[in-house]
Every structure is written in structure tokens, then in C-alpha cells.
Amino acid sequence: MITIFGSIAQEESINIGNSIAWGKRSQAKRGIIKVGNANYGYRIGENYELVIEEEESKVVRRIYADIQAGKNYTQIITGLTRDRIPSPKGKEVWGLSTVKQILQNVVYKGDYLYQKYITVDTLEEKTAPNEGELPQYYIEGHHEPIIDPDEWEKVQTIIQQRSEAFEQRNHEKYSKDQRKNSSFTERLLCGECGSGVGYERSFERRGSRGTREINRWVCRLAEKYYAVNGCSSQRFHQDYLEQHFINLLKEIEQDEAFQQEVESVIAQTVLSAQELMQEEEAQRRMEHLNQELYEAVDEELHKDGQDHQRVDALSEKIVKLHQQLKDFSDRKKLAEHYRNEFKEL
């Protein structure tokens, strides 16, 4: 009953959430962790422990073997895609960040970092990286490793050495006034195959005129440059993309139909006068039912009554009202988001 009630009232929800989190942290200090979500290559066992998932673990071992064999990230991604191995999210094409995460996560050597992320909004269930707000607990030998710890450390050394060599090459090779346009990062998709488009920089000799740097963007699975049996897309110079993006913005600015479409979407998203009245009524009803539920739970706690049905009925009503209010709140936030984006554009 307390858990049901606590999930509805915001103050109680936060208090109970903090109590549960405190209990979990106390267990973590003693090395006791009940895992809620399994990393790729593992599944959750009966006692909330990480258990190796055989087929996925083969892919993890392959990725570690590939990096030790001298392959780069693009070659690893190309191989996985060519062999039709689905990504952890079931996609045909693996993402660069996914491969990096697998290669650098301590979970694969059998260790566990508790409270890597924290909850920043109890009701909205939003999380964010823990940057020192709460203590973290590192547990060695928490579960069976997929990768031998010594091998895992060797891979980290390889990654670090490659990163340092890459930075050094760029420092020596490229001038400081040449930069990639980070506005395009993680925002471009290949029109041929739908995979991500990445940035590359090259150094071109121009005879007696010296050399120049070239900033380009290209599909990570382009057959001509990276993948075997990949897509047929070509490289695009960065200035070409920038100019066409500028032209697109100009067209949008002058397109009255586009503006009308956006305003129509916003108008459909905002709450109507009737819905605003429904929201106010739901808030009043929620306050009244919360008070009733407080009294009912208090009676149960003090053994003054055994009216479980009343508590259940009140809880059910509050859950429905809570969802209705959340839907209204989400609509308001979405409408505000649309307005801000349109204004910025």
C-alpha cells in the first residue's frame, strides 16, 4: 500500500525513491548488486545477477579480437554489418558509439560500476550521467567475465595508444584554422543506405602551390571507401554541405506553407480551453483523493481498520488521474518545445 501511494504523490514518491536508493547504495558498499538491466552479451539471472548469453558473447569476443588484430572501428562495423549480425538494438548497421562502449565497459571483464547514472527526475524517470553528485562503487569480480581481465586491459592500452597517435598526426598534419563543422555531427544519414555519415579530413598536395586541407563527409559504409558490398554513396565536401544547408534555410524562411504547417502543429498540440478546465478539475480531484488515501493508509498502519478495498479503489482512481495530468503536462512541454525550436529556426 505504501509503495502504491508513494508512486502517486510527488513528495512521497521522492522520499520513498531516496530511501530505496539509500538501501541499494548500502548494499553496493558491501559488494551486493541486484542488476536491473543486462549489457549486451549478458542476461539477467534468477537472482538478478549477470549471466553470459552465449551467442551475444561470441560477438563481444569477436570485437575484442578484431581490435587486437589491428582493425579500426570502421572495419569492425563493416564486418559485423557484412555478416548480418544485428546490433544490440536489433539494427542492421552497428553504431560507432556502440562498438566503443563494448570495448571500454568494465562489465566485460567481470567488474561492475554502480551508480554510473543517477535519476534526476523521479516522476519523469529521467536519468543523467553521475558526475560526482552521488558516490560510485566499483566492484571487482562481480560476475563471470566475457573477456579475460588481462586481455581487457591490453585492449584499453591499444585504444589509448591509437588515440594519442591520431591526435599527434592531426596536430602535425593539419593547420589550426581548419575545423570540421560540428553542427553536422551525428545528424547526417546516408541517402543510399540510411547509415550514419561521418567526418574525414585529408591533406592534398597542389604542386608548386603547396598543399591544402580538405574537409569531407562520407557514409561509413560507402563501398568505394570503406565497406565491402556497401552502398554507392560518394564523399561530400563540407563547403558543399554548408552551402546547400544555407540554401535550405533560405527556402524555409520564404516558405509560407511551411510556417503555416508548423503553426498548425503547435495549435493542435496546445491544450484547448476545455482541456485546461479538465486539467484544473483533475488537479482538484487529485488533491481530494490524495487526502482520502493518506487517511486510509494511516488507518491501515495503525491497525484501526482493514479496508484494503478502499485503498485499492482510491489508488486506482489516483493512478488514472496521475496519467491524465501527465498527458496534459507532456502536451504543454511539447508545444513549448515546438515554439522554441521554431523561434530558433
Image (cartoon, helix red, strand yellow):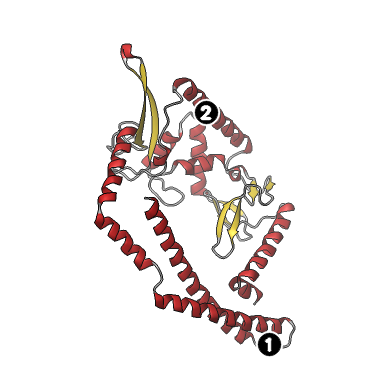
Tell me the element at label 2: helix
Left or right, 58 with respect to 190, comes to right
Disc 1 marks which residue?
Answer: 306
Disc 1 marks a residue whose amino acid type is Gln
Left or right, 340 with respect to 207, comes to right
**Vertical comparison of 254 with 229: above or below:** below
**Vertical comparison of 90 with 218: above or below:** below
Report the quarter where the N terminus lies. Answer: bottom right
Between residue 181 and residue 164, name the one nearer to us.
Answer: 181
Between residue 182 and residue 163, name the one nearer to us.
Answer: 182
Looking at the picture, how far across and down is residue 250, in whole percent? 28, 45
**Vertical comparison of 302 with 117: above or below:** below
Q: Residue at x 61, y 38 (%)?
A: 148
Looking at the picture, how far across and down is residue 190, in whole percent? 32, 42
Disc 2 marks which residue?
Answer: 162
Q: Residue at x 35, y 32 (%)?
A: 216
Number of marks drawn? 2
Q: Which numbered disc flags the more N-terminal residue, 2 or 1? A: 2
Disc 2 marks a residue whose amino acid type is Arg
Q: Residue at x 26, y 47 (%)?
A: 251
